[in-house]
Image: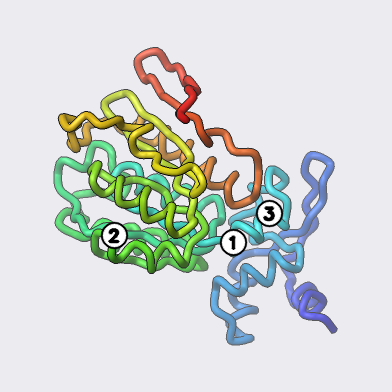
Amino acid sequence: MTPKTILTACLTSLQRLCRNGQETRTAADQELLAWGGAQGMAPWQIYEQALAADIWPVSLERNFPTLTTAEQLQLWRSRVLVLGLGGLGGFQASLLARLGVGRLVLADGDTFTLSNLNRQLFASPQTLGQNKAKVAGRQLNLSHPALQVEVIDQFLDRQSLPGVLAQVQVALDALDTLAARRALFTTARTAGVPVVHGAVHGVYGQVATILPQDGEAFPALYGSDPSLSDIVVGIAPTVCLVASLQVQEACRLLLGWPLAYHRRLAHVDGDTGRLEILPLF
């Protein structure tokens, strides 16, 4: 018997699912984990085996049929870097996990403070003073125990970024400072890794996708004005919206779908509710 046949035969919770004229199968997460654990498999590997056998864990099946089983498996095997786990990064990490991106690298050297409570998903009175990447990793593992989450509780710079970028397919920009953002753009271009940029100021936000072949992207986004401020002020709805647009674009990158924001800038205007797409390069 093949591994697929053995898995199918062992699952009592296996059910057929028909949605929008397309058919697949689902199985309870608890049973999948129990079966795989008895085989000595790690949780991440169990979900990989299930999806490879065209069986959706119930915790992911609402992604079907927007995603095919093959696409979900591709996302599960992908590894994404989230740089900064505050406002944008907290929502990015949570959305990537719920999308079923199976391997996440979370990097941030900062700790939660009271001023983070207005917009940062993992900030709470209980997490004040704790490292943001560690808190995010812990919360994701609680809600999605099969994920592979690597936590880096320090700021990445030009020296440390190359080794981390070599392990991922996409990097999500949730950084606070222009210097850190410039370092990311330059290092990712050298490493050949796409970056989905995002930034928020007040009720305004922006998203852009930067591919390695695009050259120096920082001047196109920020020009050369030395007076630009690093101070991040924004409200939660704008932060969540920009993070959502970034994760959707990361999904397109990982699955090879047409990109929405490559060589273009998505500008969010929270005053008018408008989303404008502007030429970038």
Mark 2: secondary structure: loop
Where 184 falls versus 146 (above or below)?
Answer: above
Q: Is residue 130 left or right of residue 266?
A: left
Q: Quadrant of the N terminus?
A: bottom right
Q: Earlier in the sequence, mark 1 or mark 2?
A: 1
Category of crowding for the residue at label 3, using alpha-carbon neighbours closer than 10 angstroms: few (below 14), some (14–19), many (at least 20)? some
Q: Nearer the viewer, residue 33 or 223?
A: 223
Q: CA distance from mark 1 to mark 3?
A: 9 Å
Query: Does residue 142 appear anywhere in the picture?
Result: no
Q: Is residue 81 left or right of residue 45?
A: left
**Which residue in the rendered view is the most extreme toward the top?**
272
x and y, in percent, of residue 57 in the image: 64, 61
Q: Is residue 152 left or right of residue 34?
A: left
- Badge number at residue 158: 2
Residue topped by disc 3:
71
Q: Nearer the viewer, residue 269 or 93?
A: 269
Amino acid type at circle 2 is Arg
Marks 1/3 in contact by CB < 8 Å: the verdict is no
Query: Does residue 6 appear anywhere in the picture?
Result: yes
Q: CA distance from mark 1 to mark 2?
A: 28 Å
Q: Earlier in the sequence, mark 2 or mark 3?
A: 3
Q: Residue at x 19, y 37 (%)?
A: 230
Count the numbered circles shown. Answer: 3
Amino acid type at circle 1 is Trp
Residue topped by disc 1:
76
Mark 1: secondary structure: helix
